[in-house]
Image (cartoon, rainbow, N blue to C red):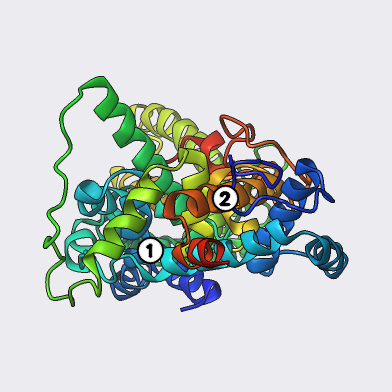
Amino acid sequence: MNTGGNSDDPRGDQHGMASSSDCDTCREAVSAALDGEAGPEERARVDAHLAGCAACRAWQRDAEAVTRRARTGVVVGGPDLVARVVDAAPGPRVRWRGVTARAGLAAVGLAQAVLGLVGLVGATTAAATHAGHGSDPLMVLGAGMAHAAHESAAWNLALGVAFVAGALWTRHLAGLMPVLGAFIAVLAVLSGIDLVAGRVEPARVVSHLVVVAGFLLGLAVVRTVPRPGAGPSPGARWRSRPDDLPVAPDGPRATVPTPWERESDVA
Amino acid sequence: MDDASITALALRAREGDRAAAGEFVAATQHQVWRLLGHLADPGSAEELAQETYERALGSLRRYRGDAPARSWLLSIARRVAADHLRRRARRPVAPAEPAEDDHPLGRAPQPDPAESAAVRDALAALDADRREAFVLTQMIGLSYEDAAGVCGCPIGTIRSRVARARADLVVALGEPGAERAHRSG
């Protein structure tokens, strides 16, 4: 290490006015000032020290010169990697899968909404034709067949809207999946029982497959969308001003991990 | 190209924009290659730069734009260099030293090979942490704050490492002007 008080330094401090620790502090500040990283007060202190220390004045000139040599004396240019690395990049493949799944989900959503509308119109006209016959003969839990059909049609329409909306605003899709999964599981069991008992036509059960298709496409979209929770967590954000150690020792190793390293997301 | 534009390119590349990915690489590859030449060795810099971009583009989906994309990329390059040095330490082979006339394709030769070699040797002889801080701030042109982000250390550490690197370089490169002045005076 080159210190100002070193007696065999050819540019040593012949006046004996400054201690070597003053010179070390000064030279760090001189270095920061060369990079425009020293504040006005610090620069004033540096100037005061330099005025009385020939060794540090010489060091300042030398430091400036070696920095210039290091900046200009190394190779310019380098290999062109654009074609090589961009062709190997995995991005678009995933993206296309995502786009395809979203388009499919939107189409399934439209089909489901149409099914819901058809069901709604059918239930309403059926209710109207039966209106003359007085009250619904089959009341279950306070609802007649007509109202049960209305409710089911409303659900089907709502699912269609949810699929289309999920295809458009993918970040909300993940929340829909548990609801849909439960709906499909219960419906599958009940449809099986009703089919065996002859309470439903196979064509009606087949129409439920549209919901299943929507569910599967929804899962595919959720998998391809960049997860909002991945990457650095809010607590691991880039530290804008890590000035907890204003003059830190030249330690053997960095003590604070790079924010992204906590995520171990760079394999 | 400034950091904001580079970050914007990275975010577009994340959405699958290949042209933006190409521009992102074009805008940053020289600095990545240069950094790796100093952190690892010049002979491996090209291969390591490619590895850096493979890692970066592979994990771009998880980059959220919280930090400047250039700093994010350089911190990946830093890790690639560290991994490379660890691999080499485990399985020691003599690294291929680049010949003096070993220039990248299609580039002008260096202005003064002797001067370049002297500077390169002096940099290579620096303590690794000091060299990293010096290269990031002086050759790559990062602010102390951004360099601290890349290295994951406080700004004050970068500041003192840069100063010590300068002090070491002053000794190693022995400013001829100053010595002449001393001898004659």
Residue B93 makes an appearance in the image: yes
The quarter of the picture where residue A205 lies is: top left
Which residue lies at the image location 12% right of the left edge and 70% below the top edge?
Answer: B105
Left or right: B125, with A65 as reference point: left
User: Residue at left 64%, top 35%?
Assistant: A256
Q: Is residue A3 left or right of residue A247?
A: left
**In the foreground, B1 or B183:** B183
Q: CA distance from mark 1 to mark 2?
A: 24 Å
Residue at the spot 13% in from the left edge and 75% down from the top edge: B106
The amino acid sitting under disc 2 is Ala
Residue B15, position as x, y percentages in the image: 40, 65
Tag 2 subunit: B
Look at the numbered disc 1 and give the secondary structure of its residue.
helix
Label 2: how many residues lie within 10 Å, few (<14), some (14-19) or many (20+)? many
x and y percentages locating residue A135 in the rendered image = 68, 52
**Dot label at residue B167:** 2
Residue bearing the label numbered 1 = B31
Q: Say few, some or many: other residues with alpha carbon within 10 Å of mark 1 (under 14 / 14 to 19 / 20 or more).
A: some
Measured along the vertical axis of the image, is residue A176 above or below residue A95?
Answer: above
Q: Please state which amino acid type lies under the numbered disc 1.
A: Gln
Is residue B149 visible from the viewing direction of this image? no
On residue A201, the disc is none
